[in-house]
């Protein structure tokens, strides 16, 4: 009897010490009501359901034990809605007509500050099209329009590059660095090396380099680079073997990939 009591106390002690996540969500999108939502993550090369719940009267809730901090995707059936960092604390998700937001915990707050700033840059880039139309209506010479807008577009693109690079650098040793790296690289059909990626890897910590996605992507990209430079026998480009789900960033980050379930 004492052994059973002792074992029960040990289990209870470990359970009390374990970290847990708590996700409370609300939605003003009527289409979500009655739907089933899932938290999905890549684990050992396989996409797995972490948790699920129903949306009832615009409210939903996930909770469970947390073995490690990870970035996951919130899905409605097979459609990815937004990224969430599962970490200890009360995570608050809001899904509205103007877009989703996640906050309440340090990493989620940091991720969505980044997303908001990135969205602002993308909106500025989109506004250049409207500006072009307005300048044409004003009778401005097309060559002058192109020259001016190309300068502005290049400036915004540089700001976006700097924002992403700095964010990844600042988060080399937590899940945000590899997560955002996966977002920017998953847009490519095959792993490639760009000046931005080369710079990031030159500054990366061992923790970042040894992330499973980062490690496989960089290895495949280097092999593809060698083939393009004639250092290896020509062959089809090396794809990513990991059946990965890129963390999706809410619109208007349309240049980031839609993750596949």
Image (tube, helix red, strand yellow):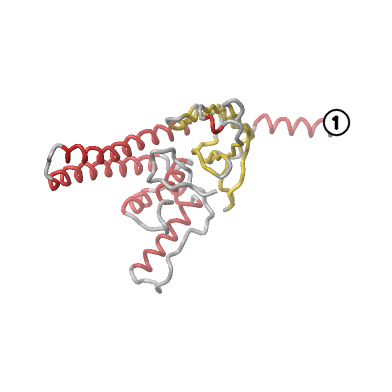
Residue placed furthest toward the bottom: 233
Please provide percent x and percent y for residue 154. 23, 45
Please provide percent x and percent y for residue 33. 58, 30
Question: Residue under circle 1?
Answer: 2
Q: Residues within 10 Å of mark 1 (few under 14, many from 20)?
A: few
Q: Residue at x 58, y 49 (%)?
A: 47
The picture quadrant where one finds residue 129 is top left
Q: Is residue 199 left or right of residue 55?
A: left
Q: Report the front residue among 70 and 141.
A: 141
Residue placed furthest toward the right: 1
The picture quadrant where one finds residue 14 is top right
175 shown above or below 26? below
The picture quadrant where one finds residue 63 is top right
Q: Report the front residue among 142 and 37.
A: 142
Q: Report the front residue among 76 and 47.
A: 76
Please provide percent x and percent y for residue 20. 61, 32
Please provide percent x and percent y for residue 153. 24, 43
Q: Is residue 193 left or right of residue 106?
A: left
Q: Please state, as top left, top right, bottom left or bottom right, where the N terminus lies in the image.
A: top right
Q: Residue at x 30, y 40 (%)?
A: 126
| Tally of numbered tags | 1
Asked which secondary structure carries label 1, the reply is: helix
198 shown above or below 112? below
Q: Residue at x 40, y 74 (%)?
A: 233
Q: Report the front residue among 73 and 214.
A: 73
């Amino acid at each position: 009897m004492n052994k059973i009591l002792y074992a029960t106390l040990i289990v209870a002690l470990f359970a009390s010490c374990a970290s847990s996540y708590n996700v409370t969500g609300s939605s003003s999108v009527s289409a979500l009501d009655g739907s089933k939502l899932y938290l999905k993550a890549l684990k050992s090369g396989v996409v797995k359901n972490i948790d699920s719940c129903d949306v009832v009267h615009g409210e939903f809730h996930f909770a469970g034990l947390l073995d490690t901090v990870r970035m996951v995707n919130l899905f409605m059936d097979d459609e990815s809605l937004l990224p969430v960092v599962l970490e200890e604390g009360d995570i608050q998700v809001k899904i509205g007509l103007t877009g989703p937001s996640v906050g309440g915990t340090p990493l989620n707050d940091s991720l969505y500050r980044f997303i908001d700033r990135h969205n602002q840059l993308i909106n500025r880039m989109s506004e250049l099209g409207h500006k072009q139309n307005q300048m044409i209506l004003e009778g401005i010479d097309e060559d002058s329009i192109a020259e001016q807008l190309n300068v502005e577009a290049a400036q915004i693109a540089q700001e976006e590059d700097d924002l992403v690079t700095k964010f990844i650098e600042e988060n080399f040793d937590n899940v945000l660095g590899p997560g955002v790296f996966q977002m920017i690289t998953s847009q490519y059909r095959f792993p490639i090396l760009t000046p931005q990626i080369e710079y990031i890897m030159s500054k990366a910590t061992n923790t970042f380099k040894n992330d499973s996605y980062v490690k496989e992507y960089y290895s495949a990209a280097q092999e593809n680079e060698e083939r393009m430079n004639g250092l290896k026998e020509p062959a089809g480009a090396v794809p990513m073997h990991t059946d990965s789900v890129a963390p999706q960033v809410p619109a208007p980050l349309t240049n980031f990939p839609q993750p596949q379930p």
